[in-house]
Structure formats: C-alpha cells, structure tokens
Image: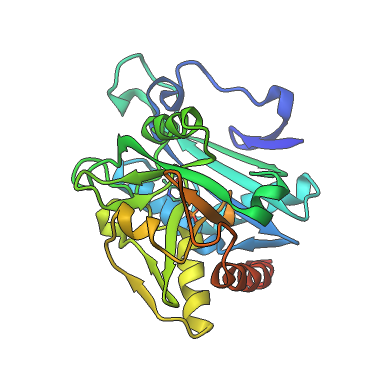
Amino acid sequence: QWIFLGGQFVKKEDAVISVYDHGFLYGDGVFEGIRVYTGNVFRLDAHLKRLYESAQSIMLQIPYTKEEMTQLIVETIRKNQLESAYIRVVVSRGKGNLGLDPSSCLNPNVIIIAEELAMFPKEFYEHGIKIASVASRRNRPDVLSPQVKSLNYLNNILVKLEANQAGVQEALMLNDQGYVTEGSADNIFIVKNGIVYTPPVYLGALEGITRNAILDVARAQGFEVRETPFTRHDVYVADEVFLTGTAVEVIAVVEVDGRIIKDGKPGNVTNQLLEEFRRIVTTDGVA
Ligand code: PLP
C-alpha cells in the first residue's frame, strides 16, 4: 500500500510523521473522508471545497491547488490499484516548535491514504442499528464552527465512547438547546407521514456531502424535504430514522434511546433513497 506523504509516495510501513507535527501535538489541521465507487470519486469537488474552506477558516495554507490535489488523489487511487475505496486526506500544520503558536510551522503536511473500508457489518445495513442520545454537546457554532472538519475530533470521540458505553452503534448528538444535530460522524434524517426531515446545519451539524446527496435524491424522487429543527421526541415518534455519511453511507436506525422505531425494521423510504443513492455514487463525481 502506497501513501502520499511529504510530497511523495511512500510505503505504508514508512509513512510516519514527526512528533513535532502540530497535527499530532494539538490536533491542528483539517481532513476529509472521501469515497471511491467503481472508479468514481464521489462528489470530489464538494469534498475539496469543504477541505479548502476548513483550512481557510483556521488560517492554514494548503500547498497545492484544488486541481493538483485532485490529481494527487486520483494518483493515490491508481497507485494502490483500488476500484472502490475510502480516501483520507489530512492537512496538518506541520512540524514546529513546542507551543501552540503555529508561526514556527512552515510546511503544512499533506497526507493521502486510500484503502478499503467496511464501516459496519452487513447485518447492520440489512436490519438497522441502534443509537442513543449522549450528554456531550456539539461545539457552539460561534466558537469553532461545526463546518470546520478539523483534526480536533475529541468531542466526537467522546460521543462515540458514550455510544459504546450505552451498547449501541452510534450516538445522537444534541446542541446546547437540546435540538437534534447529528451523529459522531454522520447526519440524521427522519421520515414522518412521507416527508423527509433533517436538521438545518445552523443548529450545529456538519453540512455532510452524503446528506446533501440524499436531499438531492429525495427531491428528485418527488419527496417533500424539510430542513427544520426537531427534538428527540420527534425522532422517537418518527416513521423512519436513518443516518448518512461518507463512512456509513446510508444506514437505517431501528431503535433510539430504547424506543423501537415503528415496526423495528428499516423503512421503505430509507430503502428507496438508499437504492437511488447506490445508483448515483458511481457516476456523480470525478472518474
Ligand atoms: N458529521 C460529522 C461530524 C462528520 O465528521 C461527518 C463525516 O464527514 C459527517 C457528519 C458526514 O458528512 P459527509 O457525508 O460529508 O461524510
């Protein structure tokens, strides 16, 4: 396996970074997770837009243009001879002195990893997963914007640990007003009376690229779609619940905080959207 690191391709065993890299020391950097489906890099432009906007927000200069980055990603996939893959792009602040000030970090570190990924076992996709709401809250948008996909994911890790402790597969995160925002690394949707709902991102959710793809798919399939705030109660009494994300793709949720959703099976709307999603992922993007 080949990894792009320090301006060249190195073997997986040799892909190591300095202990002085501020990405390692302080979580100072940004990242993206991107999916390749039978040779198509799904919505790569949207992922690069988010990566460069995250970098702009934390005053991090990515040393490649988006066109160069596209080439590097495509090259990483080719070199590893992957048809379908999960790509991780990391841009860290790079090597510097100890101390938070990034001024001593002169060369941001760009890393591209491509590998096969199976997020959850097949049964979970067939039968749905259980989620639980957690005590950890989403960052306030006025502090560190939830739109910045930074290397500082400790909050999301705490959320995942809470889900593990509760014996469920994923967490349901709320904002500080108690509105539902998202999972640890995925967006949430509910379906009620045939209408598809997802929280507006201003409540404190990352504007997921899979989320936006599902919104497109749902509209194209003739569903009414609403981005409106909702609470845990609305999730408990929904007809269907599902999560979306680059890693999980689309996965049905059949139990939330111990409440069985409807008949406890993945719903028809979820399945219909998933089917259409599977169709577009091989064409919508960079081949
Ligand atoms: N929410 C968070 C906090 C995430 O890290 C992710 C993963 O990228 C998502 C949602 C889902 O976004 P996307 O569909 O772009 O992967």
| Residue at the (63%, 74%) spot, across then down | 276
The quarter of the rendered structure image containing the C terminus is: bottom right
Q: How many marks?
A: 0
**Residue 93 falls in image quadrant:** top left
| In the depicted structure, whether residue 81 falls above or below residue 217 | above
Q: Residue furthest bottom?
A: 222
Which of 67 and 144 lies nearest the eye of the viewer? 144
Which residue sits at x=28%, y=67%?
228
Q: Position of residue 97 (x, y in %)?
A: 36, 16
Residue 102 placement, left or right of 114: left
Q: Is residue 60 left or right of residue 69?
A: left
Residue 190 appears in view: yes
**Which of the pair 149/105 is nearer the observer?**
149
Q: Say how the picture is coloured.
A: rainbow
Q: Nearer the viewer, residue 263 or 100?
A: 263
Residue 46 versus residue 103 in the image, above or below: below
Give the answer, above or below, for where 76 lies relative to 269: above
Residue 38, x across and y down, in percent: 75, 61
Tell me which residue sits at (55%, 43%) in the image.
89
The percent coordinates of residue 265 (x first, y second) are: 59, 59
In the rendered image, residue 125, in percent from the top left (x then y), is placed at 65, 54
The answer to whether residue 68 is seen in the rendering is no
Q: Quadrant of the N terminus?
A: top right
State the residue at coordinates (27%, 62%): 229
241, 138: nearer the viewer: 241
